[in-house]
Amino acid sequence: MNNKTEVSELGCVGIGTRLVWGGEKVRHPYNATQTPIVASAAYGYDDIDVWYDVALGNTPGFIYSRMSNPTVAILEDKICELESAESAVAFSSGMAAISSVLNTFLAKGGRVVSTRDSYGGTNKIFEEFLPRMGVDVTLCDTLDHEAIEHEIALGCDVLYLETPTNPTLKVLDIRRLAQAAKRVGALVVADNTFATPLNQNPLSLGVDVVVHSATKFLSGHGDVLGGLVCGSGELMAKVRHHREINGASLDPFSAYLIIRGMKTLALRLRQQQRSAQALAEYLLTEPLVESVNYPGLPSHPNHDVARSQMRGFGAIVSFVLRGGMETVKHLLPRLRYAHRAGNLGAVETIYGPARTTSHVENTLEERLALGISEGLVRVSVGIEETDDLLADLKQAFEYTKEQLLKSEQSNFIPVRTECRTEVEI
Ligand SMILES: *Cc1c(COP(=O)(O)O)cnc(C)c1O
């Protein structure tokens, strides 16, 4: 399928429309209107010459589903529409996508520059796997753009960015850092999972390769794992070759679920981020809360950068509870409309402490070094009514305060701190 034609055909259409129709112009067997799940490991040919031509890639077609599959190909075309990319490659999970991209573009003696804050699994690749393969990894203080630029200027093969970050919602200036990378000829990779293509298009900000965990907002229902990578045809040919051999391909059943979920991304996320803003503003006024992280708050340290590169601020909010784990253990079980789980981006609201979710693999010391305190809670705001989510959180805080006052072990008393009220909506 020619991704380029699809981009030009739907490129000027609104993103909500592209989410529904992008990649879907293929005629299906039986005139089915929905993408069929093509559950076949291999594709048969009577004509041996045609078979050979398809196998060589000279004629379009399918040979073996580790290489390519008709259902998966439609998903790949859809993400191309949304990120205005020439080509895309789907993987069995976000981590399969990220590790394959890093393995494609880095080799022994190479160097990658990134930040300390990144998804826990990505961080493990940087700390554990890449050094073992002889790749030099430099992780900078996430908010110190000058330090990141300095490290890039020393020379590197890959600059790896994730913004907003998990779970503290730090925002990196993509344009600025991509420019620094271009000066030394480095490839720029960005994880766009938190923002989604609805809010941010890294390719238009100077990034070369975009990665997504489709497990999160893209699929949106917490019922499937998947990863997507997109960029130029030339770069994606290399990533695709890597996937053909390492075998981290997406299966057609999962591809179908992701396609189905993506059609409603705009409706879901617009509602989710309206509620996220409301929850973040409420949390600022809550005495038991020490700090709130949300790029949509004017008090966010990089609110202006977020405004300049994002169309919306996303549906993830995090906050630090006074009293650490003790407070977390009172508050979280009390919530009615919430899963307490490690996932994010689903239609249900999900709460989880960083200690047991994004940074479960780190020791207490490592977490503290990363600025992740034991009282840090991440909320993935769902599609429930905003007022219900607010009421639920308020009643849980009231209950928690009563419990803390009752508790003899509690060695701190919640005090009302100064809070910002001039929040813009
Ligand atoms: C979840 C996540 C990943 C990993 O994706 P999986 O599908 O779980 O493998 C990578 N990056 C970010 C930002 C994530 O939230």
Image (cartoon, grey):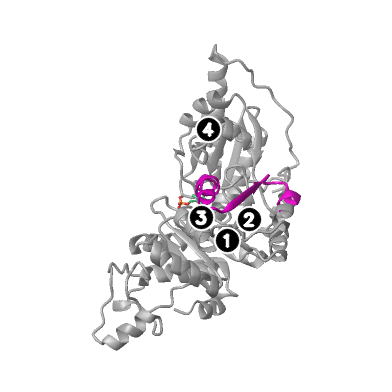
> Is tag 4's residue or tag 2's residue first in the polypeptide sequence?
2
Residue beneath the point at 36% across and 70% down: 69
Q: Distance between the residues labelled 3 and 4?
A: 35 Å
Residue 17 visible? The answer is: no
> Is tag 2's residue or tag 3's residue first in the polypeptide sequence?
3
Residue 88 locus on image (x, y percent)? 49, 69
Q: How crowded is mark 3: few (under 14 residues within 10 Å), some or many (20 or more)?
A: many
Residue 51 locus on image (x, y percent)? 30, 83
Q: How crowded is mark 1: few (under 14 residues within 10 Å), some or many (20 or more)?
A: many
Viewer-nearest residue: 218 or 131? 131
**Which marked residue is nearer to the observer: mark 1 or mark 3?**
1
Q: Which mark is residue 268?
A: 3
Q: Distance between the residues labelled 1 and 2?
A: 8 Å
**Which marked residue is nearer to the observer: mark 4 or mark 2?**
4
Task: Say which residue label 4 marks.
Answer: 363
Q: Looking at the rendering, which quadrant does residue 405 occupy? A: top right
> Is tag 3's residue or tag 4's residue first in the polypeptide sequence?
3
The three-letter code of the residue at mark 2 reads Gly
Say whether mark 3 is within 8 Å of ligand 1.
no
The three-letter code of the residue at mark 1 reads Leu
Residue 373 locus on image (x, y percent)? 60, 32
For the residues bearing labels 1 and 2, Cβ distance under 8 angstroms: yes
Viewer-nearest residue: 82 or 225? 225
Label 3: state its secondary structure.
Answer: helix
Residue 99 visible? The answer is: yes
**Which marked residue is nearer to the observer: mark 1 or mark 4?**
4
Task: Say which residue label 1 marks.
Answer: 198
The three-letter code of the residue at mark 4 reads Thr
Say whether mark 1 is within 8 Å of ligand 1.
no
Q: Residue 398 carries which label?
A: none
